[in-house]
Image: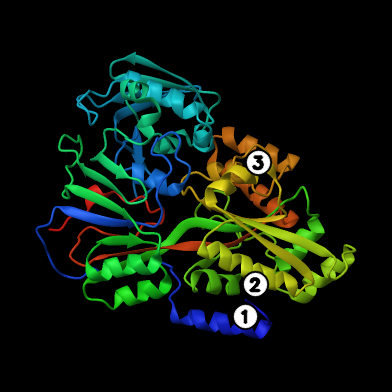
Amino acid sequence: MFKSRKLYALLIAAALSFTLLAGCGNSNAPGSGGREDLVIILPNDFTTLDPQKLPSTAEINFCANIFDTLVTMDENLEVQPSLAESWEMSDDGLSYTFKLRQGVKFHNGTELKASDVAYTAKRFAAEEWMQFCSFMVDSAEALDDYTVKINLKYPYAAFLSSMTDMYVVSEQYMEEKGAAAAQEPMGTGPYKFVKWDIAQQIVLEANENYFGKAPHIKTLTFTIIPDANTAFVALETGTADLSFNISAVDFEQAASNQKLATDKCIGNSCYFINFNTEKLSKEVRQALCYAIDKEAVNVLVNEGTGVVADLCLVEGQEGYTTDIETYAYDTEKAKQVLADAGVAPGSLSLDFFYGESAANSKLGQALQSMFNEIGVELELRPVETGTWWQLFGDGDYTVSRGGYPMETANTDIPYFDMFHKDGTFNVSRINDPEINAWLEEARTEQDAGKRTELYVKAAQKIAGEAYCYPVYFSSSTIVYNAQLKGVKAISDQKYLYSEFSWE
């Protein structure tokens, strides 16, 4: 727990033993093997594998190996064919017509048809968890067996990028299996579901009839190991072959182990301190921002491996700007802002409501100590992560933690979801008429330059009002058996295991 500015400095100095992740650097070791299986560590079990009800990035990324989408995005953020061979947009931008690959088979042997895509699109648009990327879909219809038309509520420039989150399902299978489909997923992807032993493991096997390149590795076993120490021992002993997002200490230890290889890059998840704007005034929010030492938080929570952020975007994304209020760490300034707002030292008591995890607990302790230095009491309120998801919408908190996987090719998705009054992840409970209007206008604006202007104005207003406070981007690390080929850390951690091999 932080007690003084001097201790902040010591912690920041400790971070010098770690390298900030400004790029990727693979340390793949030589070797080969004749294996056809791969064991991947998961820190937590899943709640559902229904592809239209996936509650978090972990489930979404996992299902990318079982299901396919109409289109994909390459490394240059260019849209590429997948289940759809080609597509056309109507002149008014209100519909897209996709021509499907013929002969694509679901894992049960039935052929993919346009009716399956239309069924998926309707389900995609109806499910609450998918609203962050399906909001623009109005209807869908199969024109023939291999042609499907998706109609939009209004023209949406980033529609095709949103389609990378629509995993296509079999209408017949979903209707016949009902709720059981969430425990036994079935798609067209490179791997087929075999079994799910709750809290123990999930097993997938290669789809030999995959329309794309057949996977080199035939069996994937995802073993669930919540304890970080146990997980690292599994890597060291060869019981497991791959794990991602491990601690900085374990990552450095793995880098010195000849049997293991490592890779790292900046992650795409940005983490915030969220202030409940319905309960805290602008002046109080600003004072709390001045009280937060981001560098010290990064050291305590991430062991210095995260990247401190003033904005939830990176250079090159629509809306990126450096022309915003940044609230440099200054406890005396924080005290003065509170005093000017009529808040006496020791009179303000807040709570920090968060999903229970080691990182969130460390963050809570840091905030508790930092706020204490300006005379503000902070009570820590950890709850089980699933409970947090259920209860944050009630707004019964003053401070919380938010994290969001930023969409590189689509600023609208994270901005609308976090900062619009109707956003599903509006943890700060923002309802600013100007911001609402700018984000709504940006959704239908076809000109990229004009969209950027709208997002910049929204970012400036969010920062100026201190609705929430970006703190850091996480790092993305991966540790794996040195004989495994084709491995590279990626920012969104959507690993496609069909690209890996032992050869």
* Amino acid at circle 1: Tyr
Q: Which residue is mark 2?
A: 293
Q: Earlier in the sequence, mark 1 or mark 2?
A: 1
Secondary structure at badge 1 equals: helix
Q: Is residue 213 left or right of residue 458?
A: left
Q: How is the image coloured?
A: rainbow
Residue kind at label 2, given as amino acid type = Asp
Q: Which residue is mark 3?
A: 420
Whether the residues at callouts 1 and 2 have beta carbons within 8 Å, the answer is: yes
Q: What residue do we see at 64% from left, 35% from top?
A: 440
Residue 170 vs 141, above or below: the answer is below
* Cα–Cα span, label 1 and label 3: 35 Å
In the foreground, 448 or 100: 100
Q: Which residue is mark 1?
A: 8
Return the x and y of residue 63 as percentages of the image width and height. Answer: 35, 42
Look at 47% across and 71% down and name the residue there.
Answer: 305
Query: In the rendered structure, are the residues bearing label 1 and label 3 in contact, judged by CB atoms less than 8 Å apart?
Result: no
Residue 85 placement, left or right of 55: left
Looking at the rendering, which quadrant does residue 280 occupy? bottom right
Q: Residues within 10 Å of mark 3 (few under 14, many from 20)?
A: many
Label 1 vs label 3, nearer the camera: 1
Image quadrant for the C terminus? bottom left
Which mark sits nearer the N-terminus, 1 or 3? 1
Q: CB of mark 2 within 8 Å of CB of mark 3?
A: no
Q: Is residue 119 something that shows in the picture?
A: yes
